[in-house]
Amino acid sequence: MRTATMRAVRLHAFGEPEQLVYEEVARPEPGPGEVLVRVHAAGVNPPDWYARRGFPNVPAALRPNWTPPLVLGSDLSGVVAALGPGVTEWRPGDEVFGLVSFPGRASAYAQYAVSPAAHLAPRPAALGHVEAAAVPMAGLTAYQYLFTHLRGRVGGTLMVNGAAGGVGHFAVQLARAAGAERVIAVASGRHEEFLRGLGVDRFVDYTRTPAEEAVRGVDLLLDTVGGPEAHRLLPTVRRGGRIAPVFPGDYHRERAAGLGIALDEGMWQVRSSGSDLAELAALIDAGKVRVGIDSVFPLREAAAAHVRAEQGHLQGKIVLDVAGRASSGRR
């Protein structure tokens, strides 16, 4: 019997985006507790390009033991195509989206992908597949931090650094529901209209005035930028406040402690959860959360999508249109 095949983008060697090759590969089969999804769109996330490079930013002792060739991608939106043994909550034809097997390895840059059934949620009625694929990792990162890690106890003033990006633009919208009284967005000036449209109370253009000079008294800083200069933001946070880094950064831990600032570095990570994603989908369908799309590329142009990602300064998310006919959904 001839093996069923599909088109996918595979990484043949760690390195630059050109190592991502669009080709024909074997179609996967769902195992016990798994679902085969016909992928309509796949999100592009920072862990994808970390993996493409071989995780050089991860200490050797903690580095995943992944060996090319492999298919990247953890965010998807699509239609259930087949069920593995024991799956009762889904039916073929159901429209779903999800963050698949994270932290861990998934394979969403493909026409078909296998997912644990529990990692999927019904696709929001308000979104087409392209927009839905932009939600899972970034949306869950913001949602789980605010509602699970902090249990919704945010209060006071929340500042989001890198507010126009994937996690950032979800966080500024979810902040109110989590209890924030005031939301400050830090980004470059070209994102001001976008972020004010999402309802932020104050916008700080860091290219004109650094946030550390313009802001004081923040209760919670959600930093989606990190990096070696992250400690510059310490003056913005009040004594007794908290810093939540999405990406690793140098916050001068001893100085932060001396200022009475709690630092959550290394304590928390987003995880796949269909139930959490369903809660987030309800907020989207209720009109409380909008999805920002930076750019959309055909699956065969995944390498170009990675080039765009590494240019930075994104406004929302980058998505791969796998089916080539994804609907736009209502806004």
Image (tube, rainbow, N blue to C red):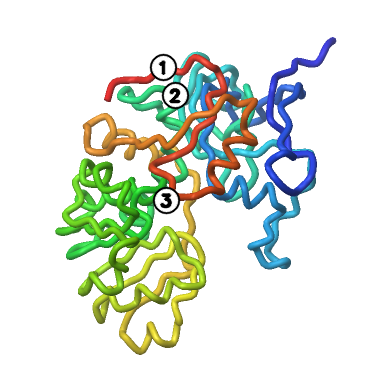
- Label 3 packing within 10 angstroms: few (<14), some (14-19), many (20+): many
What residue did someone put label 3 on?
A: 141
Q: Going by the image, does 96 lie left or right of 145? A: right
What residue did someone put label 2 on?
A: 129
Front residue of 230/190: it is 190
Q: Is residue 203 above or below residue 116?
A: below
Q: Which residue lies furthest to the front in this view?
A: 208
Q: Which of marks 1 and 3 is nearer the N terminus?
A: 3
Q: In this view, does 119 lie above or below 86?
A: below
Task: Point out residue 288 in the picture as x, y percentages from the top left corner.
Answer: 22, 38
Q: Which residue is drawn at 45% across and 82% down?
A: 253
Q: Is residue 197 above or below residue 87?
A: below
Task: Point out residue 51 in the picture as x, y percentages from the top left corner.
Answer: 66, 49
Q: Which amino acid does label 3 sit on?
A: Thr
Q: Which amino acid does label 2 sit on?
A: His
- Label 2 packing within 10 angstroms: few (<14), some (14-19), many (20+): many
Label at residue 98: none
Front residue of 310/105: it is 310
Is label 1 in contact with label 2 (beta carbons under 8 Å)? yes
> Between marks 1 and 2, how big is the CA–CA gap?
6 Å
Task: Point out residue 55 in the picture as x, y percentages from the top left corner.
Answer: 68, 56
What residue did someone put label 1 on?
A: 327
Task: Point out residue 188 in the picture as x, y percentages from the top left corner.
Answer: 34, 54
Q: Which amino acid does label 1 sit on?
A: Ser
User: Circle 3 — which element?
Assistant: helix
Q: Which residue is drawn at 53% across and 24% down?
A: 321
* Residue 252 sits in quarter: bottom left
User: Circle 2 — which element?
Assistant: helix
